Amino acid sequence: MGDISHGGVFELRLNPQYYDFDPSGIAHNVVYIRWLEDGRLAFQGASAWPPDRLYAADIAAALTRTEIVYKRPIRLSDPVTVRVWVTHVGRSALSLALRFLHPETGLEYARAEQSGCFVRRSTGRPIPMPAEFWEFCRSYLAQIGLPDGGEK
């Protein structure tokens, strides 16, 4: 499991599997979505509101946007780390930046941005961010030097 360090950047070492790759040994584009989810959920798990706590409170984090820019292919033998950090926080929504990197060289394989909001699981309707998670985000933004809204 990763942790939030390095100026508010969360880092998680991924463990790509053989089935993540096409016959030519290159990571299939759809697997990046799963790896984004792995990084985002691990980042959330390091916060005051891990996924199981949200679930118990009838809350879900719903993605509203995902964008990936592929820089170079990830090959079967390549080690991969995903880095995650918050770029914007609103009262009910937040945005994340994610990078897929070679852990030793820092070579960038891909970059992504995700946005989402919190919803009541039982109704599917958007809700304000839980107060404790909001405070975690505000503290986090202060740690990395961004104002409350996350705008640089």
Image: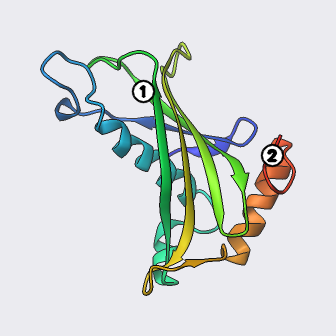
| Front in this rendered view, residue 31 or 15 | 31
Would you name the residue on which mark 1 appears? 80
Give SS at disc 2: loop
Q: Which is in the foreground here, disc 2 or disc 1?
A: 2
In what quadrant of the picture does the C terminus appear? top right
Residue 59 position within the rendered picture, expressed as x and y whole percent measured from the top left: 51, 78
Residue found 50% across the figure and 50% down from its top: 65
Does label 2 or label 1 sit earlier along the sequence? Answer: 1
Residue found 76% across the figure and 38% down from its top: 7
Q: Is residue 147 above or below residue 73?
A: below
Residue found 46% across the figure and 72% down from its top: 52
Residue 12 position within the rendered picture, expressed as x and y whole percent measured from the top left: 50, 39
Q: Left or right of 138: which side holds 103?
A: left
Give SS at disc 1: strand
Mark 2 Cα-neighbour bin, 10 Å: few <14, some 14–19, many ≥20: few
Would you name the residue on which mark 2 appears? 151
The amino acid type found where label 2 is placed reads: Glu
